[in-house]
Amino acid sequence: MIPPCEVPCTLKLHTQRVIESATRAHGAAAAELTFRVDRGHLLSAGSMYGTAYGRALCTWWATVITQIGTDEIATDHALRRVRAWARQYLTSEPGSALPGTLFDHAIAHASRAAARDFLTATGELLTLHAFPHEEAK
């Protein structure tokens, strides 16, 4: 869910807020995992999943930033372009011919979940700014 702005927000500002939120969440998950490793604690599946998921989600958002910065395109165009790549990743990524480990499967699952959540968040951002009157509700 995209948090509403107190003042009218541009798509770029909303996108920056979502990216900052994703970055903070990934940083917290990575810090927890690092803390556990440093203290010699057993690693939990949750902390490993959270870190892998956060890294994958931040990678999608970093791709948006790269598109805006290097290609100098508008935020909405960058979001749509990266959304198309995320959809392609989810629907046409070929399966591996080699058997993988359970760990490989878990990382792939986290990566797919991040792509789906990226699509959801960017869809909300684009819808919110296509119909700005909806934000006031």
Image (spheres, rainbow, N blue to C red):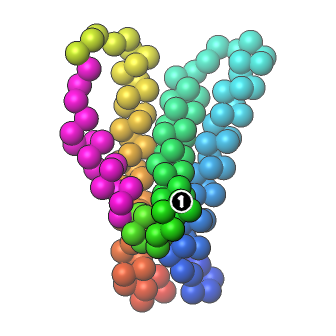
Query: In the image, what residue type sits under mark 1?
Result: Thr
Residue 43 image position (x, y, % from top left): 61, 18
Dot 1 surroundings within 10 Å: few (below 14), some, or many (20 or more)?
A: few
Q: Is residue 102 magenta?
A: no
- Residue 2 seen: no
Residue picked out by circle 1: 70
Residue 98 image position (x, y, % from top left): 27, 11
Identity of the residue furthest to the right in this view: 39
Residue at left offset 59%, top offset 73%: 13
Residue at left offset 51%, top offset 44%: 59
Residue 16, image quadrant: bottom right
Question: Is 49 placed above or below 122 here?
Answer: above
Residue 127, image quadrant: bottom left
Question: Is 106 placed above or below 71 here?
Answer: above
Question: Going by the image, does 104 lie left or right of 10?
Answer: left
Question: Going by the image, does 111 lie left or right of 22?
Answer: left
Q: Does the magenta stretch include residue 88?
A: yes
Residue at left offset 28%, top offset 42%: 90
Between 124 and 1, the one lying in front of the other is 124
Residue 9 image position (x, y, % from top left): 56, 81
Q: Give the range drawn in magenta.
A: 80-96
Secondary structure mainly formed by the magenta segment: helix
Residue 40 image position (x, y, % from top left): 74, 12
Question: Is 38 placed above or below 123 here?
Answer: above
Residue 26, image quadrant: top right
Looking at the rendered structure, the number of numbered marks drawn on it comes to: 1
Local secondary structure at mark 1? helix
Quadrant, the C terminus: bottom left
Between 93 and 115, the one lying in front of the other is 93
- Residue 13 seen: yes
Residue at left offset 28%, top offset 10%: 99
